Image (cartoon, helix red, strand yellow):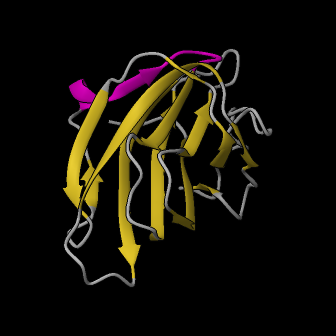
Amino acid sequence: MGYGHRYTLRHEATVSTAISILQLVAGAAVPFLIVAASLTQDGSVTSVQEKIAFVRKSAAATVTTAVVGTHLFKLRNADPTPGLTLSTTGTGVIATAEGTDTDVPYEKGFNVLSGWDFNPSEAERIHVPGAGIIALKFRTAPASQVMQMSVTIEELG
């Protein structure tokens, strides 16, 4: 079975506050599914439990705009430029101001030494409608450390 165009938004940064770390905003006519995500840390040897969530938003956070080839990557060279909205209130990394959270379709605790992987079955993939906003967010302030984060999506439009 074939699949739609897939893209990965990824970043590495020191995170120490309850904040949206990756935000994705679908193009007006380009809904998508979240097909995978991960979160690991670099440098800590301390066992600490943290909480991560996918949070839908009715108003976007202010973020550093994602750049294709720096933060946003095609999984196949032949894929077109993603339909995601790229702007400071669109697809980007590390919020400086939060938008308005609505529902939380997924939330999970994890140990930083083990990292966190989200690999849902096809039936459990989170759907984001055209112009929809979703963020990967620390719901509580994590212990300050360098985090490597990624979300892979499949565009449906």
The answer to whether one can see residue 58 in this image is yes
Nearer the observer, 46 or 112: 46
Which residue appears at 66% of the width and 33% of the height?
61
Tally the numbered discs. Answer: 0
Left or right of 119? Residue 36 is: right
Q: Position of residue 42 (x, y in %)?
A: 40, 79
- Part of the protein shown in magenta: 122-132
Nearer the observer, 108 or 70: 108
Q: Position of residue 129 (x, y in %)?
A: 53, 15
Q: Position of residue 78 (x, y in %)?
A: 65, 52
On screen, residue 129 above or below 114:
above
Nearer the observer, 149 or 100: 100
Q: Is residue 123 magenta?
A: yes
Q: Is residue 59 magenta?
A: no
The quarter of the picture where residue 108 lies is top left
State the residue lying farthest toward the right. 87
Which residue appears at 52% of the width and 44% of the height?
19
Quarter of the image with the N terminus in it: top left
Which residue appears at 46% of the width and 47% of the height?
152
Quarter of the image with the C terminus in it: top right
Left or right of 62? Residue 50 is: left
Left or right of 156? Residue 44 is: left
Nearer the observer, 43 or 150: 43
The answer to whether one can see residue 2 in this image is no
Left or right of 101? Residue 88 is: right
Q: Position of residue 16 (x, y in %)?
A: 49, 60
On screen, residue 28 above or below 135:
above
The quarter of the picture where residue 87 lies is top right
Which residue appears at 63% of the width and 26% of the height?
99
